[in-house]
Amino acid sequence: MSTPSEIPSFLALSEVLTGFTEFELNGTGQTQRYFSTLSDVVGAATVAELLTTFTTLAEAAGDDAEMLDKTLRAEILSSEKLGPVARNLIKLWYIGTWYQLPAGWHKAFGVGSEDKDFVPHPSSYVEGLLWPAIGAHPPGAKAPGYGTWTDAPKIPKVPSS
């Protein structure tokens, strides 16, 4: 089970990894479920290492988002240990599915029997960030109205920096 201090760090990391705000992430109703999924699969020690590394990078970067992005890529996403875990977290938020970590990761770092492809909860698919990212609704759920799937999704413009 998470401690109150881990969830804010988990959400801050998830914000940077997904590009969605804490408000939007919490709005999916999946925050605790995804944190628990991550902890159950890779273990509390790996989660603590991931969150501690991120917190250290975020504190060093301050308000410099470009620096945080650069150091996150170098220290977490490029890490042999933390990279696959962080990439799986991105997939979990976007697609609502945990994908088994690579065999090489298992060999190097070990992991319990919980690491397999699975959907944590039926609502994970419906609440995936994929749908708002492409400006669409999940087929078979949250229907916007009869016949609206005949129209192409309207992808929102990304503000230029």
Image: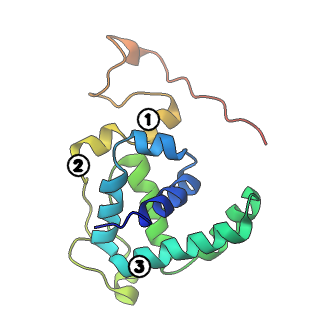
The Cα atoms of the two marked residues, 2 and 1, are separated by: 17 Å
- Badge 2 amino acid: His
Query: Can you identify the residue that label 1 sits on?
Result: 131
Quadrant including the C terminus: top right
Q: Position of residue 84 (x, y in %)?
A: 46, 71
Depicted 125 relative to depicted 100: above or below? above
Query: Which element type, helix, strand or loop, lies under badge 3?
Result: helix
The residues bearing labels 1 and 3 have C-alpha atoms spaced at a distance of 29 Å
Between marks 1 and 3 in the image, the one whose residue lies nearer the viewer = 3
Report whether 153 appears left or right of 141: right
**Tag of residue 121:** 2
| Discs 2, 1 touching: Cβ within 8 Å | no
Residue under the image location 44 percent in, 70 percent down: 85
Q: Amino acid at mark 3?
A: Thr
Residue at label 3?
Answer: 46
Q: Estimate how packed mark 3 is, as few (under 14), some (14 to 19) or many (20 or more) residues with alpha carbons within 10 Å.
A: some
Relative vertical location of residue 155 with respect to residue 23 in this rendering, above or below: above
